[in-house]
Image (cartoon, grey):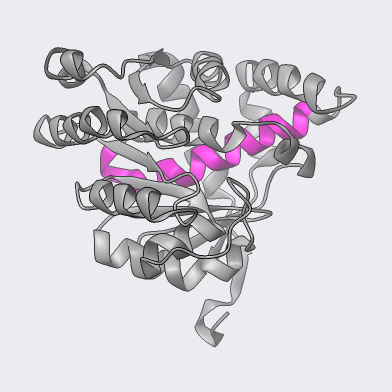
C-alpha cells in the first residue's frame, strides 16, 4: 500500500447511505436480469428477493431484445461459461448500454483459461457499470494474463489487487470491487474498504455471485452514484452474514440465516453495523 493510501478514520455517514440504498431497493423492487451460472441461480434469486428486488433468470438470446430494455439492471456471471452463452451475454450487455441500463460483470475464474479471459475482456469492452471479482480475477483482468488459479477461489488477498483494481477502473471507466476479508471498491481515484462479513461465508457456494446480483439491484436504484451503491451492497450483504452467523451451526444453516437476516435487516442493524473506511 502506497503512502497516500493510508487508512482514514471511519466515516459514519456511510451507514446512512447504505440504509438509504436498501430502503430504496425495498420500496422500488428493481427488476434485475441475471445471466448467470447453474450453481448460483438459486442463491442469487433468493438474495435479490430477500433484499426486496425482483430477479429474472433470463438468458435466452431470443428474449434479449424484448426483455432486457424493460429491466432496471443486468447482471452477467460467467461461472459455467460455454461458447453457447456468449452471444446472449454480449447481446444483453449491448442492449443494456443502449437502453441506459446499468450492468454488472462477475468475471468468475477469469484467469483460469485463455477462453475465460478472452470472454471477460470482450465483456469488459462493452462498458459495464461495475466489475466485481476476487483478487485473482481482478488481477487477471487488469494484466490480461492467465495465471495460477484455484478454480473459482482467489489466490490473492483483496489488498494484493488494489493497484490492479484502480488500473482496471481507470481503463474501463467503471467501478471495480474486489471481494476479500476487506472488500475494496474503487472508481480509479477513490478507494473505500468494507470491513464486514464472516469467514464461513467463503464455505457457501455462490455468495460472491449473490453479492454481485445485489450490487446490480443497488446500482439500479442509484445509477448516478454507482460507487456508493456498490459499497453499500457489499457492506449490507456482509452484515447479513454477521447477523446470520449468530444463529448458524455451519455453512448450511448460515446460508439459510443469511437470507433471513438480509430480509429482516433494519435501520439500527445497518447504522451500527456498517464499517466502511476511506483509503486515499
Q: Is residue 273 above or below residue 73?
A: below
Seen at 69% across and 40% down, the residue is: 273
Q: Which residues are magenta?
A: 223-244
Residue extending farthest bottom = 3
Q: Is residue 207 above or below residue 47?
A: below
Left or right, residue 250 beside residue 49 = right
Can you see residue 190? no
Residue 90 in percent (x, y) is at 21, 36
Give the number of marks: 0
Residue 61 in percent (x, y) is at 20, 20
The image quarter in which residue 42 lies? top right
Q: Is residue 207 above or below residue 258?
A: below
Taken as a whole, is the magenta stretch helix, strand or loop?
helix
Specify whether residue 22 is painted magenta. no
Residue 119 in percent (x, y) is at 30, 47
Front-lying residue, 201 or 5? 201
Seen at 35% across and 21% down, the residue is: 32
The image quarter in which residue 87 lies? top left
Amino acid at each position: 500500500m502506497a503512502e497516500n493510501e493510508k487508512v482514514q478514520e471511519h466515516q459514519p455517514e456511510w451507514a446512512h447511505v447504505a440504509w438509504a440504498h436498501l430502503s430504496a431497493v425495498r420500496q422500488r423492487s428493481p427488476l434485475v436480469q441475471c445471466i448467470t451460472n447453474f450453481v448460483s441461480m438459486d442463491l442469487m434469486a433468493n438474495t435479490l428477493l430477500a433484499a426486496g428486488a425482483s430477479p429474472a433468470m433470463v438468458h435466452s438470446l431470443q428474449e434479449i431484445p424484448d426483455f432486457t430494455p424493460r429491466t432496471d439492471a443486468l447482471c452477467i456471471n460467467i461461472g459455467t461459461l460455454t461458447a453457447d452463452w456468449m452471444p446472449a451475454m454480449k447481446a444483453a450487455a449491448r442492449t443494456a448500454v443502449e437502453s441506459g441500463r446499468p450492468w454488472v460483470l462477475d468475471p468468475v475464474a477469469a484467469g483460469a483459461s485463455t477462453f475465460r479471459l478472452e470472454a471477460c475482456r470482450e465483456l469488459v469492452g462493452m462498458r459495464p457499470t461495475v466489475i466485481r471479482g476476487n483478487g485473482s480475477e481482478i488481477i487477471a483482468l487488469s494484466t490480461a494474463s492467465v495465471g495460477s488459479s484455484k478454480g473459482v477461489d482467489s489466490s490473492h488477498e483483496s489488498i494484493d489487487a488494489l493497484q490492479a483494481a484502480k488500473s482496471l477502473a481507470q481503463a474501463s471507466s467503471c467501478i471495480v470491487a474486489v471481494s476479500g476479508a476487506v472488500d475494496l471498491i474503487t472508481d480509479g481515484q477513490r478507494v473505500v474498504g468494507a470491513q464486514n462479513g464472516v469467514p464461513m461465508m467463503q464455505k457457501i457456494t455462490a455468495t460472491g455471485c449473490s453479492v454481485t446480483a445485489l450490487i446490480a439491484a443497488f446500482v439500479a436504484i442509484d445509477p448516478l452514484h454507482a460507487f456508493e451503491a456498490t459499497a453499500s451492497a457489499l457492506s449490507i450483504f456482509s452484515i447479513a452474514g454477521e447477523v446470520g452467523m449468530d444463529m448458524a451451526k455451519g455453512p448450511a444453516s448460515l446460508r439459510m440465516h443469511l437470507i433471513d437476516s438480509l430480509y429482516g435487516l433494519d435501520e439500527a442493524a445497518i447504522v451500527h453495523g456498517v464499517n466502511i473506511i476511506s483509503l486515499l
